Amino acid sequence: MYKHILVPTDGTRLSDKAIRSAAELAAVVGAKLTGLHVLPPYNLAISGYEIAPVVVFSPAEYRKVSAKTAKAALDKIEIAARAAGVSCTTLSVTDEHPWEAIVRSARDRKCDLIVMASHGRRGLSGLLIGSETTKVLTRSKVPVLVVR
Amino acid sequence: MSYKRILVPIDGSATSKAGLKEALKLARIPGARLRLLHVVDESPLLSLPEAGYSIDTVIEDLKRSGKALLASVAKSATAQGAKCETAMVESMGMRVADQITSDAKRWRADLIVIGTHGRRGVQRLLMGSDAELVVRNTTIPVLLVHGTQRKTVKRKR
Protein backbone atom coordinates (compact mmCIF):
# COMPACT_ATOMS: atom_id res chain seq x y z
CA MET A 1 0.00 0.00 0.00
CA TYR A 2 1.05 3.58 -0.48
CA LYS A 3 3.58 4.88 2.00
CA HIS A 4 4.46 8.31 0.68
CA ILE A 5 2.12 10.49 -1.36
CA LEU A 6 3.31 13.56 -3.28
CA VAL A 7 0.76 16.30 -3.74
CA PRO A 8 1.79 19.18 -5.99
CA THR A 9 -0.14 22.45 -5.63
CA ASP A 10 -0.22 25.72 -7.48
CA GLY A 11 -2.29 27.34 -4.77
CA THR A 12 -5.46 27.48 -6.86
CA ARG A 13 -8.83 26.13 -5.79
CA LEU A 14 -8.43 23.32 -8.28
CA SER A 15 -5.52 22.06 -6.20
CA ASP A 16 -7.58 22.14 -3.03
CA LYS A 17 -9.58 19.10 -4.03
CA ALA A 18 -6.43 17.15 -4.84
CA ILE A 19 -5.01 18.14 -1.44
CA ARG A 20 -8.16 16.98 0.33
CA SER A 21 -8.17 13.67 -1.57
CA ALA A 22 -4.47 13.11 -0.90
CA ALA A 23 -4.81 13.79 2.83
CA GLU A 24 -7.85 11.52 3.16
CA LEU A 25 -6.23 8.72 1.21
CA ALA A 26 -3.02 9.09 3.25
CA ALA A 27 -5.06 8.77 6.44
CA VAL A 28 -6.82 5.62 5.18
CA VAL A 29 -3.69 3.82 4.01
CA GLY A 30 -1.32 5.22 6.66
CA ALA A 31 0.94 7.10 4.28
CA LYS A 32 2.87 10.29 4.83
CA LEU A 33 2.39 13.35 2.67
CA THR A 34 4.81 15.62 0.89
CA GLY A 35 3.44 18.88 -0.46
CA LEU A 36 5.21 20.48 -3.40
CA HIS A 37 4.98 23.97 -4.82
CA VAL A 38 6.87 24.89 -7.97
CA LEU A 39 7.76 28.47 -8.85
CA PRO A 40 8.97 29.71 -12.20
CA PRO A 41 12.43 31.32 -12.17
CA TYR A 42 12.50 35.14 -12.05
CA ASN A 43 13.15 35.81 -15.71
CA LEU A 44 10.27 33.60 -16.80
CA ALA A 45 7.88 34.90 -14.23
CA ILE A 46 8.46 38.41 -15.49
CA SER A 47 8.54 37.71 -19.21
CA GLY A 48 5.93 34.97 -19.18
CA TYR A 49 2.98 37.32 -19.29
CA GLU A 50 1.20 37.79 -22.56
CA ILE A 51 0.45 41.34 -21.54
CA ALA A 52 3.20 43.28 -19.74
CA PRO A 53 2.58 43.20 -15.99
CA VAL A 54 1.58 46.50 -14.47
CA VAL A 55 4.11 46.08 -11.70
CA VAL A 56 7.54 44.70 -12.47
CA PHE A 57 9.30 43.18 -9.48
CA SER A 58 13.01 43.32 -8.85
CA PRO A 59 14.61 39.88 -8.29
CA ALA A 60 14.67 40.51 -4.55
CA GLU A 61 11.04 41.56 -4.49
CA TYR A 62 10.12 38.56 -6.63
CA ARG A 63 11.83 36.23 -4.16
CA LYS A 64 9.90 37.78 -1.33
CA VAL A 65 6.53 37.70 -3.07
CA SER A 66 7.01 34.20 -4.46
CA ALA A 67 8.12 32.84 -1.09
CA LYS A 68 4.88 34.19 0.31
CA THR A 69 2.84 32.60 -2.50
CA ALA A 70 4.56 29.26 -1.96
CA LYS A 71 4.02 29.41 1.78
CA ALA A 72 0.31 30.17 1.39
CA ALA A 73 -0.11 27.24 -1.00
CA LEU A 74 1.89 24.82 1.14
CA ASP A 75 0.20 25.93 4.37
CA LYS A 76 -3.07 24.58 2.97
CA ILE A 77 -1.45 21.16 2.64
CA GLU A 78 -0.12 21.23 6.19
CA ILE A 79 -3.53 22.21 7.50
CA ALA A 80 -5.24 19.41 5.54
CA ALA A 81 -2.64 16.90 6.74
CA ARG A 82 -3.03 17.97 10.35
CA ALA A 83 -6.82 17.71 10.09
CA ALA A 84 -6.46 14.18 8.68
CA GLY A 85 -3.84 13.22 11.27
CA VAL A 86 -1.21 12.54 8.64
CA SER A 87 2.48 13.37 8.88
CA CYS A 88 3.52 15.91 6.30
CA THR A 89 6.51 17.77 4.91
CA THR A 90 6.47 20.52 2.34
CA LEU A 91 8.84 21.46 -0.40
CA SER A 92 9.18 24.62 -2.45
CA VAL A 93 11.29 24.48 -5.60
CA THR A 94 12.04 26.74 -8.54
CA ASP A 95 11.79 25.20 -11.98
CA GLU A 96 11.00 26.37 -15.45
CA HIS A 97 8.71 23.39 -16.00
CA PRO A 98 6.46 22.40 -13.11
CA TRP A 99 5.95 18.89 -14.50
CA GLU A 100 9.70 18.23 -14.44
CA ALA A 101 9.95 19.32 -10.83
CA ILE A 102 6.99 17.11 -9.95
CA VAL A 103 8.37 13.99 -11.62
CA ARG A 104 11.86 14.64 -10.21
CA SER A 105 10.60 15.27 -6.67
CA ALA A 106 8.52 12.09 -6.76
CA ARG A 107 11.61 10.14 -7.76
CA ASP A 108 14.06 11.83 -5.38
CA ARG A 109 11.76 11.59 -2.40
CA LYS A 110 10.79 8.02 -3.27
CA CYS A 111 7.09 8.79 -3.39
CA ASP A 112 4.88 5.92 -4.50
CA LEU A 113 1.87 7.97 -5.59
CA ILE A 114 1.24 11.44 -7.00
CA VAL A 115 -2.17 13.01 -6.41
CA MET A 116 -2.85 16.06 -8.54
CA ALA A 117 -5.60 18.17 -10.05
CA SER A 118 -6.53 17.74 -13.67
CA HIS A 119 -5.89 21.43 -14.22
CA GLY A 120 -3.65 24.08 -12.78
CA ARG A 121 -3.25 27.81 -12.84
CA ARG A 122 -3.31 28.12 -16.61
CA GLY A 123 -6.84 26.89 -16.31
CA LEU A 124 -9.35 25.44 -18.67
CA SER A 125 -8.21 27.05 -21.87
CA GLY A 126 -10.17 24.73 -24.13
CA LEU A 127 -8.38 21.68 -22.78
CA LEU A 128 -10.08 18.96 -20.84
CA ILE A 129 -6.88 18.11 -19.05
CA GLY A 130 -4.13 20.54 -18.19
CA SER A 131 -0.83 20.52 -20.01
CA GLU A 132 1.33 20.11 -16.91
CA THR A 133 -0.86 17.25 -15.70
CA THR A 134 -0.64 15.54 -19.09
CA LYS A 135 3.15 15.80 -19.01
CA VAL A 136 3.33 14.36 -15.52
CA LEU A 137 1.04 11.51 -16.58
CA THR A 138 3.23 10.60 -19.52
CA ARG A 139 6.59 10.95 -17.77
CA SER A 140 5.99 9.67 -14.28
CA LYS A 141 6.84 6.10 -13.43
CA VAL A 142 4.96 6.55 -10.20
CA PRO A 143 1.17 6.09 -10.47
CA VAL A 144 -0.74 9.35 -10.77
CA LEU A 145 -4.19 9.92 -9.33
CA VAL A 146 -5.96 12.66 -11.26
CA VAL A 147 -8.65 14.50 -9.32
CA ARG A 148 -11.14 16.94 -10.78
CA MET B 1 -14.11 9.61 1.81
CA SER B 2 -12.11 6.75 0.61
CA TYR B 3 -12.17 4.70 -2.52
CA LYS B 4 -14.74 1.92 -2.18
CA ARG B 5 -16.06 1.33 -5.68
CA ILE B 6 -13.10 0.82 -7.95
CA LEU B 7 -13.55 0.21 -11.65
CA VAL B 8 -10.75 -1.60 -13.44
CA PRO B 9 -10.91 -1.97 -17.22
CA ILE B 10 -9.30 -5.23 -18.32
CA ASP B 11 -8.23 -6.08 -21.87
CA GLY B 12 -5.53 -8.67 -21.25
CA SER B 13 -2.68 -6.31 -22.21
CA ALA B 14 0.44 -5.76 -20.14
CA THR B 15 -0.71 -2.23 -19.37
CA SER B 16 -4.08 -3.37 -18.08
CA LYS B 17 -2.26 -5.88 -15.87
CA ALA B 18 -0.24 -3.03 -14.39
CA GLY B 19 -3.51 -1.23 -13.63
CA LEU B 20 -4.98 -4.33 -12.02
CA LYS B 21 -1.93 -4.81 -9.83
CA GLU B 22 -2.32 -1.30 -8.48
CA ALA B 23 -6.06 -1.75 -8.02
CA LEU B 24 -5.44 -4.91 -5.99
CA LYS B 25 -3.43 -2.80 -3.53
CA LEU B 26 -6.36 -0.42 -3.10
CA ALA B 27 -8.76 -3.34 -2.77
CA ARG B 28 -7.15 -3.99 0.61
CA ILE B 29 -8.83 -0.86 1.98
CA PRO B 30 -11.69 -2.15 4.17
CA GLY B 31 -14.98 -1.94 2.31
CA ALA B 32 -13.40 -1.60 -1.13
CA ARG B 33 -14.62 -3.65 -4.05
CA LEU B 34 -13.44 -3.96 -7.62
CA ARG B 35 -15.47 -4.11 -10.79
CA LEU B 36 -13.44 -5.77 -13.52
CA LEU B 37 -14.78 -4.47 -16.81
CA HIS B 38 -14.02 -5.87 -20.22
CA VAL B 39 -15.13 -3.95 -23.28
CA VAL B 40 -15.57 -6.15 -26.34
CA ASP B 41 -14.08 -3.93 -28.99
CA GLU B 42 -15.73 -4.63 -32.32
CA SER B 43 -14.40 -1.54 -34.01
CA PRO B 44 -11.48 -3.25 -35.82
CA LEU B 45 -13.94 -5.69 -37.39
CA LEU B 46 -16.19 -3.03 -38.79
CA SER B 47 -13.43 -1.86 -41.07
CA LEU B 48 -13.27 -5.29 -42.71
CA PRO B 49 -16.65 -5.56 -44.36
CA GLU B 50 -15.69 -8.01 -47.10
CA ALA B 51 -13.72 -10.43 -45.00
CA GLY B 52 -15.77 -13.34 -46.29
CA TYR B 53 -17.05 -14.61 -43.00
CA SER B 54 -19.75 -13.62 -40.60
CA ILE B 55 -18.79 -10.85 -38.22
CA ASP B 56 -21.21 -12.30 -35.71
CA THR B 57 -19.07 -15.42 -35.36
CA VAL B 58 -16.02 -13.33 -34.65
CA ILE B 59 -17.90 -11.21 -32.14
CA GLU B 60 -19.07 -14.38 -30.38
CA ASP B 61 -15.43 -15.49 -30.22
CA LEU B 62 -14.39 -12.12 -28.81
CA LYS B 63 -17.07 -12.36 -26.16
CA ARG B 64 -16.05 -15.88 -25.24
CA SER B 65 -12.41 -14.91 -24.86
CA GLY B 66 -13.44 -11.79 -22.94
CA LYS B 67 -15.45 -13.92 -20.55
CA ALA B 68 -12.54 -16.32 -20.08
CA LEU B 69 -10.19 -13.40 -19.47
CA LEU B 70 -12.50 -11.89 -16.85
CA ALA B 71 -12.96 -15.24 -15.15
CA SER B 72 -9.23 -15.85 -14.84
CA VAL B 73 -8.52 -12.29 -13.66
CA ALA B 74 -11.37 -12.44 -11.13
CA LYS B 75 -10.08 -15.75 -9.84
CA SER B 76 -6.61 -14.40 -9.21
CA ALA B 77 -7.99 -11.17 -7.71
CA THR B 78 -10.19 -13.15 -5.33
CA ALA B 79 -7.25 -15.37 -4.43
CA GLN B 80 -5.39 -12.20 -3.46
CA GLY B 81 -8.18 -11.25 -1.09
CA ALA B 82 -10.04 -8.72 -3.22
CA LYS B 83 -13.81 -8.47 -3.32
CA CYS B 84 -14.69 -8.26 -6.96
CA GLU B 85 -17.33 -8.55 -9.63
CA THR B 86 -16.99 -8.76 -13.39
CA ALA B 87 -18.82 -7.10 -16.23
CA MET B 88 -18.61 -7.17 -20.00
CA VAL B 89 -19.99 -4.62 -22.42
CA GLU B 90 -19.79 -4.37 -26.19
CA SER B 91 -18.35 -1.26 -27.70
CA MET B 92 -21.46 -0.93 -29.92
CA GLY B 93 -19.75 1.52 -32.21
CA MET B 94 -18.66 3.67 -29.28
CA ARG B 95 -15.06 4.19 -28.32
CA VAL B 96 -13.79 1.85 -25.62
CA ALA B 97 -13.00 4.87 -23.43
CA ASP B 98 -16.60 6.08 -23.67
CA GLN B 99 -17.90 2.67 -22.64
CA ILE B 100 -15.55 2.71 -19.66
CA THR B 101 -16.63 6.15 -18.49
CA SER B 102 -20.34 5.46 -18.94
CA ASP B 103 -20.07 2.14 -17.10
CA ALA B 104 -18.19 3.94 -14.31
CA LYS B 105 -21.02 6.44 -14.03
CA ARG B 106 -23.74 3.77 -14.08
CA TRP B 107 -22.00 1.72 -11.41
CA ARG B 108 -21.23 4.90 -9.41
CA ALA B 109 -17.52 4.19 -9.32
CA ASP B 110 -15.53 6.50 -7.09
CA LEU B 111 -12.24 5.60 -8.72
CA ILE B 112 -11.10 4.27 -12.09
CA VAL B 113 -7.73 2.51 -12.20
CA ILE B 114 -6.25 2.24 -15.66
CA GLY B 115 -2.89 1.25 -17.11
CA THR B 116 -1.17 3.43 -19.68
CA HIS B 117 1.61 2.80 -22.14
CA GLY B 118 5.00 4.15 -21.30
CA ARG B 119 6.77 6.44 -23.70
CA ARG B 120 6.35 5.44 -27.24
CA GLY B 121 5.35 7.02 -30.47
CA VAL B 122 4.85 10.70 -30.94
CA GLN B 123 4.30 13.07 -28.03
CA ARG B 124 0.58 13.24 -28.71
CA LEU B 125 0.29 9.49 -28.33
CA LEU B 126 2.43 9.16 -25.25
CA MET B 127 -0.41 7.90 -23.17
CA GLY B 128 -2.47 4.96 -24.24
CA SER B 129 -5.21 6.72 -26.13
CA ASP B 130 -7.99 4.96 -24.23
CA ALA B 131 -6.44 5.96 -20.92
CA GLU B 132 -6.11 9.55 -22.01
CA LEU B 133 -9.70 9.66 -23.24
CA VAL B 134 -10.94 8.21 -19.97
CA VAL B 135 -9.20 10.97 -18.00
CA ARG B 136 -10.65 13.57 -20.34
CA ASN B 137 -14.19 12.29 -20.30
CA THR B 138 -14.93 11.72 -16.65
CA THR B 139 -15.16 13.70 -13.45
CA ILE B 140 -14.43 10.56 -11.42
CA PRO B 141 -10.85 10.41 -10.07
CA VAL B 142 -8.61 8.31 -12.30
CA LEU B 143 -5.48 6.50 -11.14
CA LEU B 144 -3.11 6.10 -14.06
CA VAL B 145 -0.48 3.42 -13.83
CA HIS B 146 2.42 3.00 -16.18
CA GLY B 147 2.80 -0.46 -17.60
CA THR B 148 6.11 -1.96 -18.58
CA GLN B 149 7.96 0.57 -20.66
CA ARG B 150 9.43 0.19 -24.12
CA LYS B 151 7.88 -3.14 -24.70
CA THR B 152 5.53 -4.03 -27.45
CA VAL B 153 2.17 -4.54 -25.93
CA LYS B 154 0.31 -7.50 -27.25
CA ARG B 155 -3.41 -7.19 -27.33
CA LYS B 156 -5.02 -10.50 -26.66
CA ARG B 157 -8.16 -11.22 -28.49
Image: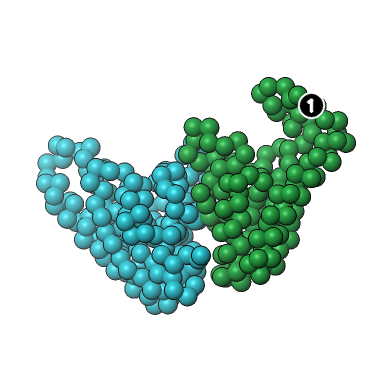
Looking at the rendered structure, the number of numbered marks drawn on it comes to: 1
Mark 1 chain: A
Residue B86 vertical position relative to residue A51 in the rendered view, above or below:
below
Viewer-nearest residue: A146 or A27: A27
Residue A22 in the figure: left or right of residue B156: right
Give the drawing colour for chain A: green
Q: Circle 1 sits in a helix, a strand or a loop, which is it?
A: loop
Could you tell me which residue is drawn at 60 percent across and 36 percent down? A122
Q: Colour scheme of this structure image?
A: by chain
Residue A62 vertical position relative to residue B14 in the rendered view, above or below:
above
Q: Residues within 10 Å of mark 1 (few under 14, many from 20)?
A: few
- Say what amino acid the circle numbered 1 marks: Val
Viewer-nearest residue: A97 or B48: A97
Residue A93 in the figure: left or right of residue B111: right
Give the drawing colour for chain B: cyan
Could you tell me which residue is drawn at 36 percent across and 55 percent down? B104
Percent x, y for residue A17? 57, 53
Percent x, y for residue A4? 64, 64
Residue B85 in the figure: left or right of residue A63: left
Could you tell me which residue is drawn at 23 percent across and 37 percent down? B47
- List the residue tagged with mark 1: A55
